[in-house]
Amino acid sequence: MYLGIDLGTSSVKVMLIDGEQHVVGSASAALAVANPIPGWSEQDAGDWESATDAAMGQLKAAQPRELAAVTGIGLSGHMHGATLVDIHDRPIRPCILWNDTRSHAEAAELDAIPAFRQLTGNIVFPGFTAPKLLWAARHEPAHFDAIRFVLLPKDYLRLWLTGEHMSEMSDSAGTSWLDVGARRWSPELLAATGLEERQMPDLVEGTDTAGVLRPELASRWGMGAGVVVAGGAGDNAASAVGMGTVRDGDAFASLGTSGVLFAANNGFKPKPESAVHAFCHALPDTWHQMGVILAATDSLNWLADVTGVSQADLTAELGDTLKAPGSVTFLPYVSGERTPHNDALIRGAFAGIGKESHRATLTQAVVEGVAFAFADCRDALASAGQTVGRAFAVGGGARSRYWLKALSTALAMPLDIPVNGDFGAAFGAARLGLIAATGADPLAVMTPPAAAETIEPDAALAGAFAAKLETYRNLYPAIRSATT
């Protein structure tokens, strides 16, 4: 048996799989996010321990024999978080999360240093880890001076699980301290934020062993001795492992809280000015690129909050038959935007609202606006050398057939819908635990699911969607000048 632990922003999920990669059981425990000041987003690292322990307790109660047979654990987690640890391995302050924007000025300052883009292959985004440390040095010097290690969220969980200070390439690539092509820490980039390599965890590949489960935790959860913990992966790379998106050109589109158009690469293809993320993948000699939008289903969640109608009911009002784009255009920048704008200050907007506009009009505009944001990601990836012609569609938004049809038509490419099953980050983490424990060939393990069906672009509406995409793109500079 093999266990995946996925540390998400809102919950910890644990999943058991057997040697044939069948899901045997899963459990989860909720997490809270603190927003003490507008733009701040924090979590207590101790809550990650408590939530993991609670989820493991549920799993032990439901599948004690299966849990006892676990020989490998894989980890996944939300990326970019700054977890500051002192000499006693205790958190110094709450973790500054991926969606925290307090360090936007520091990010711009670091991004102006040529070495950052040259070595990381990426813009220094406000959500990345390095600018948060520069912010801490300036605003919380006592905390900064007490730092012994800077750990990413899942790697703090590893410290609790194993006692090891270790990380892996895919998650570390999102810190702005990794030489992504060489797959090693950059002393030059660390020095720019007042840090040294000794304050970073050791690096392994995601498929490698990176610790052994502490005996006291193994005993508490009814597990045997010597359970290995794999390097693991950042959440997007772990999801790609779960989906089998690991071979050159494989892709998926994730309609989650944020939106991701993810493509695997057999080489490092950076183009920072495109605002495409170029990161290491979770297996050796493999990289990936991502176009990232910050509010995909979160845009619809905002509309649901405003209207008092659930997301499911809003999309149900649209039916299943795709319509030509409406007269209202929505820019989904309610939390700023990454690809292609790298704009933390831009905010969303509706344009074209008339007296005839009603709730379904706004829902249709939101769905289309997110689809057009994905089209921006597709074109940004193409400018960075990666053509995406087909992708699996995953995430909560993929439950809406209307949204899938709009997305396929906006992207002008087929979207494959996987068969029923959980192929997300927890499953990918469990796969990495299997590989670390058995030495299995990663490509033999990381196979894609079968497609239950394929959503094809609506050829009759292709021209209308292409024209509306141009309208959508022309609105960004106008809205930016009016709102920032």
Image (cartoon, rainbow, N blue to C red):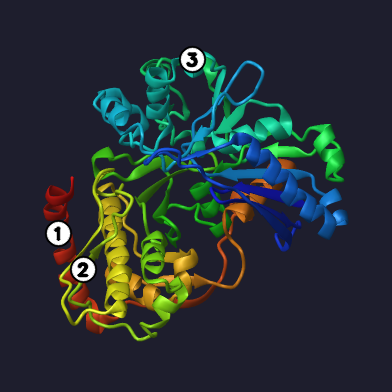
Residue shown at 73%/57% (left/top)? 17
First along the sequence among labels 2 and 3: 3
181 to the left or right of 359: right
Dot 1 corresponds to which residue?
Answer: 475
Which residue is denoted by mark 2 in the rendering? 329
What SS does tag 1 mark? helix
Q: Amino acid at mark 1?
A: Leu
Residue at the spot of label 3: 142
The amino acid beneath tag 3 is Ala
Is 151 displayed left or right of 220 in the figure? left
- Identify residue type, mark 2: Thr
- Label 2 to label 3, Cα distance in Å? 48 Å
Element at label 2: strand
Q: Could you say which quadrant of the image residue 186 lies in?
A: top left
Report whether residue 430 is seen.
yes
Q: Residues within 10 Å of mark 2 (few under 14, many from 20)?
A: many
Front one among 335 and 441 = 335
Disc 3, SS: helix
Nearer the viewer's eye, disc 2 or disc 3? 3
Q: CA distance from mark 1 to mark 3?
A: 45 Å
